[in-house]
Amino acid sequence: MIMTARGLLFDLDGVLIDSTPVVTRVWTQWAEEHGFDPEKTAREAHGRPSLETIRELLPGADHEALNAVLERREIEDLDGVVPLAGAIRLLTTLPPDRWAIVTSCTRELARVRIQAAGLPVPPTIITSGDITHGKPHPEPYLKGAQALDFNAADCIAFEDVPAGIRSAKAAGSRVIALRTTASENELLAAQPTWIVDSCAAVLAQFDSERNLLQLSVD
């Protein structure tokens, strides 16, 4: 399948890097400390700003203080943070002004994970500190496209969880979903445009005459 886009918008965790072991360890510990089901909490926290999850689970708590502790644990635990299949190859074929990272984590956490995984660093990174409403709200992907100076409808987003897929679709982007985190049924329920195993299934090149990215998807 061949498709074109003006820009590409990538979620970070579960799309470009594997941070699942860290997320699971940190959220499992947090859930046990606060009396929540560890497996359910870790699963539902994935792909959302941690502050939103804390607010939802502990409405009467000091959310900022709890989030600061949680984030520090994630920043200090980089064991197992590695690039996912095809991520580095795909990113290094793209002009730097044609792609952005749109992540639910903070800028500092995104920075240390990008560095730990050895990914190229794009000029444009949208993090939880840049938005008011997290995924599945469309704001993250609307801001990602705007930062590249494109309409979201002219971009393709790469996501691994239903909340992210719904966010990108609500912004008007087409979505390539990756089978790296959620089940096939969960991905299908969010109705992405395509589903692939990883970024390794995608080849990209820049067509300078048409001023477009051309993607080939297996």
Image: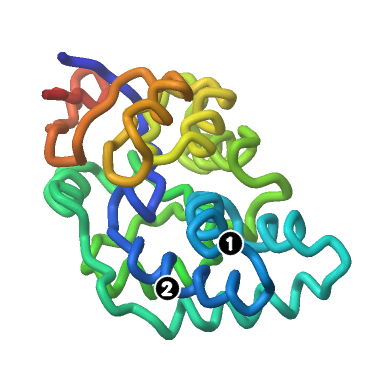
- Label 1 vs 2, first from the N-terminus: 2
Q: Which residue is drawn at 38% across and 26% down?
A: 185
Q: Which residue is drawn at 13% across and 33% down?
A: 201
> On the rendered structure, is 137 left or right of 173?
right
> On the rendered structure, is 217 left or right of 107?
left
Q: Quadrant of the C terminus?
A: top left
Of all residues, the one furthest to the right in this rendering is 60
Amino acid type, label 1: Asp
Figure check: 206 above or below 209: below
The image position of residue 117, as x and y in percent, is: 24, 68
Amino acid type, label 2: Arg
The image position of residue 192, as x and y in percent, is: 40, 22
The image position of residue 205, as x and y in percent, is: 14, 31
Can you identify the residue that label 2 sits on?
Answer: 25
Q: Residue at x 19, y 36 (%)?
A: 197
Can you identify the residue that label 1 sits on?
Answer: 37
Q: In which quarter of the image is the N terminus?
A: top left
